Image: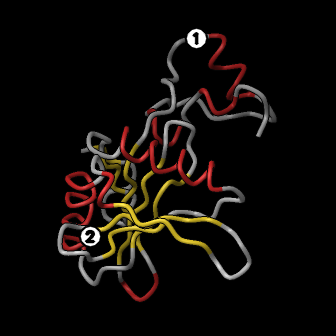
């Protein structure tokens, strides 16, 4: 990612009507004006295959912190986001794990122990633990961006 790019939100989310015109243009536009807000954490509600839904929790650095399982209905996915918001501040809701090839990951679980979301894999336990801390920090209050076919880009 180009230096400084992560400091600015993509025009798709900002409502900025300016279109990038080439490599680095978003960065240049952001320097020229304050119209482009900083990247902020958010839940992104998305369409999945077979008319199902899932969500991701994006961190302040625009990295994916968690990805949910798929849901058969949009309201069920929205309830999953609400549960993630409610459970994300608590250490006891996180389960740490390792893959067969030594990578590290974590899951966020509901009070009933149902898995809400799974992290990306990390090369170190330190990276995984930082991912958990980021979820605890942004998860409870991150807004939801509805990127489904019916509501592309809408904030809630």
Q: Is residue 24 above or below residue 140?
A: above
Q: Which mark is residue 77?
A: 2
Residue at 49% across / 29% down in the picture?
16
Residue under label 1: 33
Marks 1 and 2, how far apart at CA: 37 Å
Q: Earlier in the sequence, mark 1 or mark 2?
A: 1
Residue 30 drawn at (x, y percent): 62, 19
Residue at 20% across / 74% down in the picture?
76
Q: Residues within 10 Å of mark 2 (few under 14, many from 20)?
A: many
Q: Out of 74 and 19, give the one closest to the viewer.
A: 74
> Is 29 left, or right, of 66 in this rendering?
right
1 or 2: mark nearer the eye: 2
Residue 140 drawn at (x, y percent): 27, 44
Q: Locate residue 22: give its quadrant.
A: top right
Q: Quadrant of the C terminus?
A: top left
Q: Residues within 10 Å of mark 1 (few under 14, many from 20)?
A: few
């Amino acid at each position: 990612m180009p230096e400084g790019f992560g400091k600015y939100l993509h025009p798709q989310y900002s409502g900025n009507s300016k279109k990038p015109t080439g490599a680095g243009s978003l960065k240049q536009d952001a320097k020229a004006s304050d119209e482009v807000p900083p990247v902020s954490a958010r839940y992104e509600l998305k369409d999945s295959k077979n008319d199902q839904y899932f969500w991701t929790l994006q961190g302040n650095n625009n990295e994916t912190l968690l990805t949910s399982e798929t849901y058969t209905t949009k309201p069920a996915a929205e309830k999953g986001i609400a549960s993630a918001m409610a459970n994300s501040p608590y250490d006891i809701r996180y389960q740490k794990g390792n893959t067969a090839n030594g990578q590290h990951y974590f899951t966020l679980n509901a009070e009933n122990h149902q898995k809400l979301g799974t992290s990306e894999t990390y090369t170190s336990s330190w990276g995984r633990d930082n991912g958990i801390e980021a979820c605890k920090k942004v998860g409870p209050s991150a807004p939801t961006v509805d990127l489904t076919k019916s509501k592309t880009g809408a904030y809630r």
